[in-house]
Image (tube, rainbow, N blue to C red):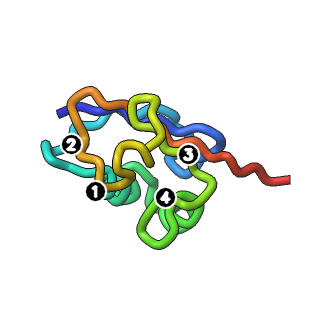
Amino acid sequence: MQITVEFSGGLETAFDGNKKHVLDVPEGSSVNWLLHHMVETLMPDHKREEGKNIFLQDESVRPGVLVLINDSDWELEGEDQYILQPRDVIIFASTLHGG
């Protein structure tokens, strides 16, 4: 099934600058599965360790990264346990800015 994943707020740099990805994922996949899948398949090898550090913490999304599932806060949808549905749009937006 297809879903769309979007990155903003600088997170796209960890994914080779690509802000939008249309992915085929197995039915029954959770957001937790998606997080690890994205690190392994969308992050370039040379950026994987750095990208993982700005994106994940303790096997989940780092604090300061807003996650929206179909424009709804993922906390209302079950966070990383949410089971992905066809045509879902998952947005990862960093709210942290360097200075």
Q: Nearer the viewer, residue 5 or 28?
A: 28
Name the residue beneath numbered marker 1: 33
Q: Are marks 1 and 2 in contact (CB under 8 Å)?
A: yes
Residue 24 lies left or right of residue 61; in this view the side is: left
Other-residue count near label 4 (Cα within 10 Å), few / some / many at <14 / 14–19 / ≥20:
many
Q: Name the amino acid type tagged 2.
A: Val
On-image quarter of the N terminus: top left
Compared to 36, does 4 lie above or below?
above
Q: Earlier in the sequence, mark 4 or mark 1?
A: 1
CA distance separating discs 4 and 1:
12 Å
Residue 29 lies left or right of residue 7; in this view the side is: left
Can you see residue 23? yes
Q: Name the amino acid type tagged 1.
A: Trp
Name the residue beneath numbered marker 2: 25
Q: Earlier in the sequence, mark 4 or mark 3?
A: 4
Q: Residue at x 55, y 51 (%)?
A: 14
Q: Are marks 1 and 3 in contact (CB under 8 Å)?
A: no
CA distance separating discs 4 and 2:
19 Å
Mark 3 secondary-structure assignment: strand
Name the residue beneath numbered marker 4: 61
Other-residue count near label 2 (Cα within 10 Å), few / some / many at <14 / 14–19 / ≥20:
some
Compared to 92, does 35 lie above or below?
below
Q: Residue at x 39, y 49 (%)?
A: 42
